[in-house]
Each structure stands twice: as structure tokens, then as C-alpha cells.
Image (cartoon, rainbow, N blue to C red):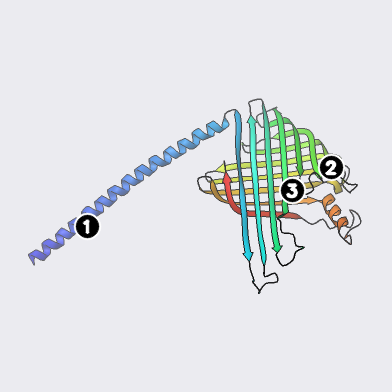
Amino acid sequence: MKKTLLLLMFLAGMVSIHAQTKEELEAQKAEKQAEADAATAEVKAIQTKIDALPGWRIRAFGTIGGSLSNFNNWYAQGAPNNTSGNIGFTLNAIANLIQPKYFWRNALTTNLNWVKLDNRDDPTDDSGFNPTTDVFNISSLYGRNITKTLAVSGLMEYRTTILDNFNDPGYLDAGIGLTWTPIQDLVVVVHPLNYNFVFSKADTVFESSLGAKIMADYAKTIGAINFKTNLSAFQSYKSSNFSNWTWTNSFSYTLWKMIGVGFDFGLRSNKQEALNYALALDPPTATDFDDVDNKLQTYYTIGLSYKF
């Protein structure tokens, strides 16, 4: 009986020692975690001060996606011998010069995609990659500060396609007005005096006009997340038929070093483009701006992301 009692007391003592040791380790862990959190907060505060210093801010990120497939004698499908695939990538680049009295903000956005479907049993079939998504946008905004958040500014923005029908149409906005920067990463441009130059190689429905330019851009990096959204709109004073707007969005999450996953999507409305497309169909599906179906234009890309 005594031996049993001594054994139980020994085991209870071991459990007590183990519990105390665990509690001590947890206390040490909490102390170190608090120190690490404080150090992380200090690093973020220092980085915020660095970001607020005058000078250039340059960064870029994007998405890469694609797939390739090959079928031989796969009789269950309509084209048993075919090669197919798609390749696409996006790029969002920013180069901003921030000074106490002025700023110069430059941005480039591209989204290019190619698709291939080669039926090897059809000698007339196109065996190459054909462009599908084709977006190119470059802008440059210069401003002189009036107050901490308000500036007199001038903007030039060019939009077109580069894989197919380059500069046909192409849009060049040039105007002056005000730029509001309520927070570091948000830029809102309101230019009531803006001319929208529209370039087209043929005698089409496209027409240049005077109007107002409104643009809002927000770009932010939070840890492993990169985010950029841009809304660019032109309101024609001549006719609403010549107005247009484009909204692009890019997200990426870094998984390892500079590689991660990304998602891009865009929306656009342009009645001149809709009418030009409808008139080119055989037979045409519209006669003028009054009966054209101006559907919302959309695209999205999902794939691997990169940044540098």
C-alpha cells in the first residue's frame, strides 16, 4: 500500500513539474510574440515614413495564364486530331515621382491573350495563335500642388489595341483640371476641359469631341496582396454617343518570393465601338446610334502572378 501511495505521489509530482514547465514555455512564447509584434509594427511605421519621402515610386505586377493540349484519334469529339491552347498575360506598371510641390504619375496597363484551335484534319484550318483579349492603356498625369490634397493638373491618356487593329480605333485624351489625393494611394482626376481624339483608318462612325475627363486610380500593396483598380471615363459635351468609360481591376497574392496567383477583370462601355462592330456584320445588326445594342464589354484573366 505504501509503495502504491509513493508511486502515485511521484506521478503527481511529475505531472505538476510538466504543467509548470509548459506554463513557463507558454509565458516565454507570449513574451517573444509580443516583442515580435512590436518589431513588426515598428518596421511598418518606418516603411510608412520611407514611402512618404519625396522621390520615385516604381513597381509592377501582373498575371500569366495558359494551357496547351494535343489530341490524336480522339474519336469522341468532333475534331479527333487537334492541338489547342491559350496564352495570356497582364502587366500593371507604375512609375510615380512625388515631390513637395508637384507630382508626375505614370501608369501602364496591358492585357494580352492568344487562343489556338488547330484541326489537323482540315488543311485550311488556321494552325496559329490568334489574339482574343487585347488591352493597352498608358497615362501620364502632372500636377502642381495648391493644397496638401488638391492640385492643378494636366493628363494625357492613350488607349488602343496592339495585337490587332493597332490605333484603329485609338483614343487619346488630353486635358486640364484638378486632381484630388485624399490619401496616399488614391488619385481622383476631374478635368472639365478635355479633348478626346479618336483615331480610325477608315471612314467610320468614330468621332473626336470636347468633353470632361474623370479618372480614379487606387493602387495598394498590403503584405502579400497587390491590388490596383482604375476607372477612366469621358463625357462628351457634343453627344452622349461619343462618351465612354473603362474600369480595370487587378489582384495578386504572393505565395513564394515573387510568384503567386492573380486575377484581372475589366468592364467597358463604348457606343462608337458597338456601332462600328454592328455595321461590320453581314448582315448589319444596326443602322445608327439609335438602334445599336451597346452591350457591356467584359474580360477576365486568372493565372500565376508575378511582381518586381
Could you say where residue 122 lies in the image, as x and y percent from the top left? 74, 66
**Foreground: disc 1 or disc 3:** 3
> Residue 63 in the image: x percent, y percent?
61, 49
Q: Gap between marks 2 and 1, in whole Å?
A: 83 Å
Which secondary structure, mark 3? loop
Q: What is the secondary structure assignment of the residue under circle 2? A: strand
Residue 167 at x, y percent in the picture: 80, 43
Quarter holding residue 93 = top right
Using the rendered view, name the quadrant where residue 198 is placed.
Answer: top right
Secondary structure state at the residue bearing disc 1: helix
Q: Name the residue under label 3.
A: 163
Query: Does 15 sit above or below residue 25?
Result: below
Q: Which residue is at 62% across, 62% downward?
A: 69
Disc number for residue 15: 1
Specify whether 8 is left or right of 268.
left
The mark that comes first in sequence, 2 or 1, is 1
C-alpha gap between disc 1 and disc 3? 73 Å
Q: Which of the two discs, 2 and 1, sits closer to the camera?
A: 2
Tell me the crowding category of disc 2: few under 14, some 14 to 19, or many 20 or more residues within 10 angstroms, Cα based.
some
Q: Quadrant of the C terminus?
A: top right
Residue where numbered disc 2 is placed: 199
Badge 1: residue crowd in 10 Å (few <14, some 14–19, many ≥20): few
Above or below, comparing residue 284 to residue 144 in the picture: below
> Furthest-left residue in view?
2
Of pointers 1 and 3, the one earlier in the residue sequence? 1
